Image (cartoon, rainbow, N blue to C red):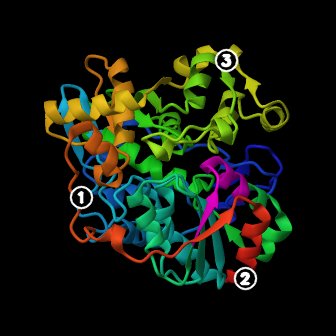
């Protein structure tokens, strides 16, 4: 299995090479030359597999340069009971509507599901190649802590994580900044997430700097993240499909488009997914696209700070991979569209709108602060389950697309403890904090606050890189 770039300027490369590269050299995103296919017989045979075993099977379809036994060991280490005491449980709410519990890992957020595998496979490849890697990433709240917990203490790896200063919850900040491991570097930039992400892309696009300091990526621009997320769509499908070959829908709170892109990939591979329901908060650039066909990213000054802060994103890094499929995998067309965004601030694919749902199963909706509070409160009253604000966005939009006979799985994005202030506002009660984390916000924190300037971040990396 080799990989190419959405912009066509990269020679085909195997998985382990693109794992370490992150962004493609031409500024595009990597994708398999072709997607593997799953049929009903294969899916039925996987029904009884453990999560670690299923991950080895699914990831093995994308990874041709790691021996099968070694990959099996990596997935069993990533998804061990000590890491995930429960893994991706289905949590029923009412007839046809349920949560897929993706927040049972060490940082209480769905990002752990992919990041724990990345931590294992990065170290595996680097040790065998005798190389080091400096991971540069940006986070709106959950990616950073999941990456840092997965990579802390790993041989040959340093992590430089950019976060928007003052724009995450207190719990999210404490999870990241309280880590004292020498290979973890937290940089809080005075700006919004999109600006942090722009710094990452600027430095990753400087090929001399990238090569000299051996920069890699853990954001979902790294294909390995997407591949690892495909696993839980297959897992969720196998848990709730009404009958062999029966269809299932997924509702996904979406900011950077990586989580729902994995569902798109699973659907393209042949998993019988009826609808992919994209839920946004007030920063509804993606919802606007699926409603109108117009992709119109907003500047940082127009990106709202909301009560579902991990989705406060107005430029979705992974969206380019879906656009690649929309234009029939034409890299020249993708390059032209991305240039239009850079020069004109938008592109228009309204002529393709019928394909969004008819061909790819996408529908979308938006949720506001008032919607979140109401959904959190009603879900608790009606089901006894407490959900975080992002999952509430997913539930609110999912309700618009429920259909008889087709189970709807809403992807749980985080545990409520990470967003206590909003939970209190909605319900009047503080969410339970998992054992061992009661003092998290009181622990000493280690973070550098910088202006949002790529040159300043580059200088910091020069002084601290491996």
- Kindly identify which residue carries mark 2: 463
Q: Nearer the viewer, residue 459 or 361?
A: 459
Q: Which residues are magenta?
A: 186-200
Q: Is residue 256 left or right of residue 433?
A: right
Q: Tell me how far mark 2 sits from mark 1, CA to CA.
A: 40 Å
Q: Nearer the viewer, residue 170 or 266?
A: 170
| Nearer the camera: disc 2 or disc 1 | 2
In the rendering, which numbered label is found on residue 352?
3
Query: Circle 3 sits in a helix, a strand or a loop, which is it?
Result: helix
Mark yes or no: residue 37 visible.
Answer: no
The image shows residue 423 at horizontal and vertical percentages of 28, 44
| Residue 12 highlighted magenta (yes or no) | no
In the displayed structure, 119 sits above or below 57; it is below
| Nearer the camera: disc 2 or disc 3 | 2
For the point 22% across and 42% down, the residue is 386
For the point 65% across and 76% down, the residue is 133
Q: Tell me how far mark 2 sits from mark 3, CA to CA.
A: 48 Å
Q: Tell me how far mark 1 sits from mark 3, CA to CA.
A: 41 Å
Looking at the rendered image, the quarter that the N terminus falls into is bottom right
């Amino acid at each position: 299995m080799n990989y190419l770039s959405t912009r066509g300027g990269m020679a085909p490369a195997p998985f382990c090479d693109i794992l370490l590269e992150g962004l493609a050299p031409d500024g595009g995103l990597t994708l398999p030359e072709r997607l593997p296919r799953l049929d009903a017989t294969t899916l039925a045979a996987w029904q009884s597999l453990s999560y670690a075993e299923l991950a080895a099977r699914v990831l093995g379809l994308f990874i041709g340069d790691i021996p099968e036994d070694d990959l099996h060991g990596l997935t069993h280490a990533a998804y061990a009971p000590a890491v995930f005491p429960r893994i991706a449980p289905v949590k029923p709410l009412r007839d046809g509507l349920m949560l897929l519990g993706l927040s049972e890992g060490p940082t209480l957020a769905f990002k752990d599901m992919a990041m724990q595998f990345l931590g294992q496979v990065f170290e595996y490849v680097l040790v065998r190649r005798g190389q080091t890697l400096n991971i540069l990433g940006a986070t709106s709240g959950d990616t950073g802590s999941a990456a840092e917990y997965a990579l802390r203490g790993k041989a040959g790896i340093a992590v430089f994580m950019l976060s928007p200063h003052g724009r995450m919850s207190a719990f999210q900040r404490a999870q990241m900044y309280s880590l004292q491991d020498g290979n973890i570097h937290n940089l809080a930039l005075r700006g919004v997430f999109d600006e942090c992400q722009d710094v990452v892309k600027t430095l990753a696009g400087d090929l001399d700097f990238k090569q000299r300091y051996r920069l890699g990526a853990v954001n979902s621009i790294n294909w390995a993240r997407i591949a690892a997320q495909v696993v839980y769509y297959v897992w969720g499908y196998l848990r709730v499909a009404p009958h062999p070959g029966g269809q299932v829908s997924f509702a996904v709170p979406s900011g950077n488009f990586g989580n729902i892109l994995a569902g798109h990939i699973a659907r393209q591979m042949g998993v019988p997914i009826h609808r992919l329901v994209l839920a946004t908060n007030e920063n509804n650039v993606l919802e606007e696209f699926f409603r109108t066909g117009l992709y119109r990213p907003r500047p940082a000054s127009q990106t709202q700070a909301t009560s579902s802060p991990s989705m406060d994103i107005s430029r979705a890094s992974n969206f380019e991979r879906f656009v690649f499929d929309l234009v029939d995998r034409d890299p020249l067309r993708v390059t032209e569209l991305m240039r239009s965004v850079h020069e004109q601030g938008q592109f228009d694919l309204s002529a393709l709108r019928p394909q969004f749902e008819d061909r790819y199963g996408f529908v979308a909706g938006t949720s506001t602060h008032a919607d979140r509070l109401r959904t959190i409160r009603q879900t608790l009253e009606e089901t006894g389950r407490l959900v975080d604000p992002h999952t509430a966005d997913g539930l609110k939009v999912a309700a618009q697309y429920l259909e008889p006979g087709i189970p709807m799985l809403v992807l749980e994005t985080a545990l409520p403890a990470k967003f206590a202030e909003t939970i209190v506002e909605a319900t009047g009660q503080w969410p339970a904090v998992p054992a061992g984390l009661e003092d998290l916000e009181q622990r000493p924190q280690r973070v550098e606050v910088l202006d949002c300037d790529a040159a300043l971040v580059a200088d910091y990396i020069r002084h601290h890189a491996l």
